[in-house]
């Protein structure tokens, strides 16, 4: 069993980007900048945004967190989006989700200039990804594909079972891995809450991507020997740690890992790759 | 075995639209208009466009075919697109594909105002479809879903195997049927030229959608008893008919039909539903 060490790979990619940024800045050019808008003070969102900010610092990007109160109006948030669209010093920006219920997420996302939409959530970027055109692919699916590519995991002709059809992980990774591309050319089965016989489907899979956010959902007896398992779950569960919680994956690692050819750990697998994908998208936005 | 009679259902939907258009025009309002731009004189494209024009006449829409020579420049075609975008009497328009090799199809499609893109090919409309948002769904996938809905074919929790990952049929219908919607909530497996064990996958399917354009590809021994089979194939094969050809589906109807609970014929199945979907999209564009 080989561990798909996202932390290590992400570190290597960050070092590469940092090198390029340093050369750029030394040549007198403007520093790339990623801005994150954070509404309210959800604990998980705070953590994600601060990880993103730290990653920016690590590679030499400028970054900025713009904090708005939980009761900010949709109109005020739209105004901020327009300002960021117009600001030439901002290469890419994200509006951290989820947003409070009184704000229409789709309206906000569709207001973002697709050329600065480094989260890849704007419909035009989702559409380009679905069509196999160059675009900003959203961070988690892009990170998964990069991790498979880094370890040269064969995907062509393999049966990939994706569990979970979320807009940010399951559906886009299903669309990516079934494209005529490398990595790609998988036969993909997209499973979700209405799926019957999930276990039987998983047992046919060469590659399983678990992205439902249900700790320990994928058990050892659902995975055939030699399978590749990607665990996207990062659910916070109470634990005796400094933060008071730990991150739990969707996969029972102890049971599943011995059966696998490759498997991602949680933490240290998909998570770090996700953040690096955001950096890569920002870098791409900067270069235009 | 029940025949999914697309011709009959399409006729009913057309009659409904015709009634609404007649009421509208009687009340003094402008007639809806669909325009088709046709480059060159490919035989199949001529046929498709003339079918669309006839369908428009049937429901009382205005329609117009704008013919351009095969050597039209990309710039001139873009100019036409801009004119159609700006023309308030045009509710929707299509640029019939394929285009000659010297024209970048994606550039043309992305120039179409998404609000007039009744083919649903613009990335923003593809993205909205992928995200499960209201949009113009492209005609063939929309027609398939409407046909399933009309016959109240249960899709929730069913395993749907889609053969073919084209941008205009396979991939969008896979995305549609896996949405949390009715019809929808299928577990979808998207298969293509790199798929291994296609027969074994088909034999697990409750619903098979064959969309590869390979006459007679799906044989009787690939379909389990009680399955629903949708045949999207419409390949022209030489025949002793007035036109010199006949339309051949991807399914060996004689072998497969006796095993099915529901099956579409070719012709008269998905084809007529496709044209009606285009009318529906135009109607939707008109109402805004």
Image: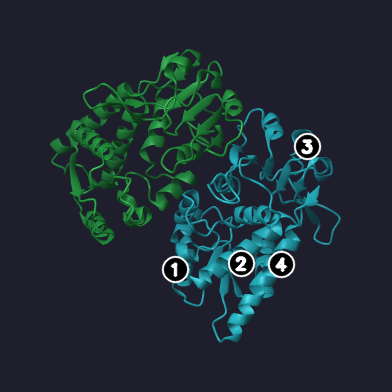
Chain colours: A green, B cyan
Measured Cα–Cα span from mark 1 to mark 3: 51 Å
Measured Cα–Cα span from mark 4 to mark 3: 30 Å
2 vs 3, front mark: 3
Nearest the eye: B128 or B185: B185
Secondary structure beneath disc 2? Answer: helix
Secondary structure beneath disc 4? Answer: helix
Residue B125 drawn at (x, y percent): 48, 56
Secondary structure beneath disc 1? Answer: helix
Residue A250 found in image quarter: top left
Mark drawn on residue B82 = 1
Q: Residue at (56%, 74%) from the top-left corner?
A: B33
Q: Residue at (40%, 30%) from the top-left corner?
A: A233
The earlier-in-sequence mark between 4 and 3 is 4
Say whether mark 3 and mark 1 are on the same chain. Answer: yes
Nearest the eye: B86 or A6: A6
Residue of label 4? B12
Residue of label 3? B225
Measured Cα–Cα span from mark 4 to mark 1: 35 Å
In this rendering, position of residue A226 left or right of residue A19: right
Residue B269 drawn at (x, y percent): 73, 55
1 vs 2, front mark: 2
């Amino acid at each position: 069993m080989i561990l798909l060490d996202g932390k290590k790979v992400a570190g290597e990619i960050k070092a590469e980007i940092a090198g390029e940024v340093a050369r750029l800045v030394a040549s007198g050019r403007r520093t790339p900048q990623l801005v994150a808008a954070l509404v309210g003070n959800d604990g998980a969102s705070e953590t994600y945004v601060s990880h993103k900010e730290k990653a920016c610092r690590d590679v030499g990007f400028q970054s900025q967190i713009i904090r708005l109160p939980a009761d900010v109006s949709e109109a005020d948030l739209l105004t901020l989006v327009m300002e960021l669209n117009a600001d030439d010093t901002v290469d890419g920006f994200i509006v951290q989700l989820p947003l409070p219920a009184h704000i229409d997420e789709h309206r906000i996302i569709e207001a973002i200039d697709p050329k600065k939409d480094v989260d890849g959530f704007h419909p035009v970027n989702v559409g380009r990804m679905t069509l196999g055109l160059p675009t900003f692919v959203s961070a988690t699916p892009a990170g998964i594909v990069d991790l498979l590519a880094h370890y040269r995991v064969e995907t062509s002709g393999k049966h990939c079972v994706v569990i979970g059809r979320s807009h940010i992980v399951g559906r886009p990774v299903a669309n990516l891995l079934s494209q005529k591309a490398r990595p790609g050319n998988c036969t993909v089965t997209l499973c979700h809450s209405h799926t019957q016989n999930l276990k039987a489907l998983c047992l046919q899979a060469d590659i399983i991507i678990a992205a439902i956010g249900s700790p320990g959902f994928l058990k050892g007896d659902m995975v055939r020997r030699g399978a590749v398992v990607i665990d996207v779950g990062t659910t916070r569960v109470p634990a005796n740690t400094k933060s008071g919680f730990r991150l739990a994956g969707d996969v029972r690692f102890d049971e599943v890992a011995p059966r696998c050819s490759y498997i991602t750990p949680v933490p240290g697998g998909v998570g770090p790759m996700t953040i690096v994908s955001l950096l890569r998208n920002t870098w791409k936005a900067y270069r235009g």
